[in-house]
Image (tube, helix red, strand yellow):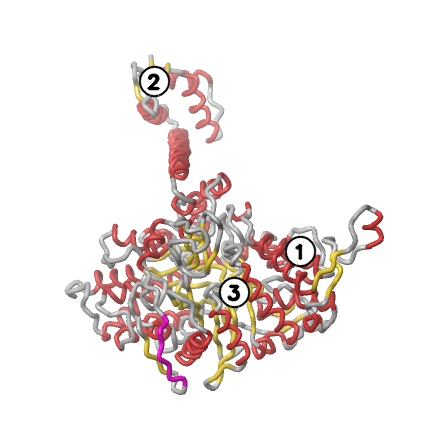
Amino acid sequence: MNVVKRDGTSEAFNASKIKIAILKAFTACGYTPQEDTVNDILDSIEIWDEIAIEDIQDQIEEILMDFDFPDVAKAYILYRENRARVRENVREREEFIKEFMRASNAAEGSEVDDNSNVANKNIAVLNNELYKSNNIDLNRYRVKEKLQVLYPDFDSKQYERDLKNHILYKHDENSTFGFPYCVALSCYPFLQGGIKGIGGLSASPKNLDSFCGMFVNMIFAVSSQFAGAVATASFLVMFDHFARKEWGEDYWKHANAGVQTYGYPYPTDVKELLENGYEEPQYRTIEKVIEQKFQQIVYSVNQPAAARGFQSAFWNVSYFDKPYFEGMYGHFVFPDGDTPKWDSLNWLQKKFMKWFNAERLRCMLTFPVETVSLLYKDGKFEDQEWIDFISEEYAEGHSFFTYISDSVDSLSSCCRLKNKLQSNEFTFTNGLVGEQTGSKSVITLNLNRIIQNYIREYKDDCPIPGTQLSPSCYPELGEYLKDILERVYKYHTAYNELLWDLYNAHLLPVYEAGFINLNNQYLTIGLNGLNEAAMFLGIECSDNKEYKEFCNFIFGTIKEQNQLHNTKKTMFNTELVPAESLAVKNYNWDKADGYWVPEDRNLYTSYVFLPESNSSILEKIKLHGSEYVGDWLDGGSAAHINLSEHPTKNQASLLLNYAATVGCSYLTFNVPNSECQDCGFITKVPVSKCPMCGSTHIDLYDRIIGYLTKIRNWSAGRQEEQTHRVYNHLTYTVDESKLGYTVNE
């Protein structure tokens, strides 16, 4: 007689397979059954031709109960369920592999959290994607387990309900459990002991050559243990230190002087080289050698890394104007007793920026993400030289971020992250504490769904969408939001305790080695769907009283609650998250579940303004200023000002001054770049036809949100969104004395 298997095929009945399963159930319960007992169970099974395997298994469960083996019957049921889960997982993974193979790019092939930083669809990427769903299940199980320990009276299953109901989103759940999010490092431990403390082989760097090679190793070693960006604010400070050791304190004054180079670690025995048949020493300028070192580091970091699912490391660097530098590094001392020097660093920073800008005409490099930190006090920038310089860089097509602050008590270290520094003290153990910041976990609120849930629960008679909610309802809405936040703080705290468990088990060597302190990183409340929530309430997302009140209410409520829940061990902040993939997911989830979404676009925005609106450049900057954002978004927000052309030096300077005046602390001017697929020509403006060879096979590069990358590597949802963006024109009539503008769009 034949048995019908689950896939519909038939095979001859094999009693031995059934017997093995029964014996496993007995063994699981600590029994050693008699052979006769097992045979009696088998004999009790009714078999007919083409019987389904499930029918046989159902009979076994009943027979075990009849034979008075309820615990064995339970074990057998669990055995069946486990086998079913394994089979289902195999089927799901097999189907995923097929879908991934059919996908147009890696982002479209991703099951969760597509990543445009993955440029290639290959077996390494598939391997990284394959078990993301399993990782999500494990991460949620671990958090629920910790919630039960920390909050015994709290229903830990609420965590999963909040996630499945899409009012919350936990970022990077798909990573192997315990990956912190993003980090800004103190590189002092690297100067003291290389990367031995984090599992590497190299000791501390001794010269410029060893620094460059080991720095790359450090970036990859650290980034393999974090889900997000790795920021090194002191990269150029360290580079300058070793350059001065190499060529003297005033090397920058004679950068065109010739130096001997051999392509070997410095110094090298010339006589030995010549005796072994090598050519006479080559002479290159100091400037040229520095450029080669830049190239070595930058191109190495931009290579895909297997440990990151075949994506490159998210690397961020900082530049400082003079007062910012003095505030950050005024008390810094290198392990050998040397101190940072402004004059040489000033030259080196400008050199790196100009080199990187020019290099992007040879290769469209994504990283590092660059941020220039500037101090603005008493109505003016304190370092006019740097305003002039970066205005010139913007005019020359450079793509970077500008961070404007009135003090050195905060540091922008990522593509928008702005973190308050708890201390900017220097120690000889791990260097400058103020460099150590970042976010160890991010949970994002879906504001559009949350607002609509509130309306459904408390305002059934309210004729919306499209009708404004009275400000008198804000206190009640605030209480509703606070209830959700209370749960988020518990979820964050549970995850934080799990990180401490890993730390105590010596599984977080980056922290143990002193590169970062767990207490210096934030637990971040991310926000998405702000504009959509406002639109649902009939509020226009523009410079108006109603929108200002709404933004102030949302941001202010969360900031107040963060401060009430801050401890030394759990510090909370808030940011408008980039939501590169989440913005599409939230939109689709809400639409599928019957929530109101704007029908004229396909995702939620990541700004205070609408990127597809025809609002002026000035209004977009103002909406990310103090009247709307204030200091409530202490985790940061980024104003990506999409332009159809690069500003002139004067325009850039005026726009930066305007941003500082209205309190917009973080912005960039974004112009799409073009690369010819046939001849490789790169231009820093969008074109449809190559000006060199006439080809129409053009790749466009744009900021997906935070970083510059190839548009065709984006998911379909993000590619569609890019076509809706408004790229403002730059035609100004300027009254410089009043900083007034007339903008023709």
Of badges 3 and 1, the one in the foreground is 3
Quote the CA–CA distance across marks 3 and 1.
21 Å
| Amino acid, disc 3 | Glu
**In the image: residue 744, left or right of residue 256:** left
Q: Which image quarter: residue 722?
A: bottom left
Q: Which mark is residue 10?
A: 2
Identify the residue at horizontal 52%, vertical 69% (top origin).
Answer: 568
Q: Which mark is residue 322?
A: none
Residue identifier under label 3: 370
Disc 2 crowd, CA 10 A, few/some/many (<14, 14-19, 20+): some
Look at the image and give the residue range highlighted in magenta. 730-736
Residue 711 position in % (x across, y down): 40, 53
Identify the residue at horizontal 27%, vertical 57% (top origin).
Answer: 601
Q: Mark 2 or mark 3: which comes first in sequence?
A: 2
Can I make out residue 517 in this image?
no
Depth check: give the residue in front, 652 or 76.
652
Residue identifier under label 1: 214
Q: Secondary structure at mark 3?
A: strand
Depth check: give the residue in front, 499 or 449.
449
Q: Secondary structure at mark 2?
A: strand
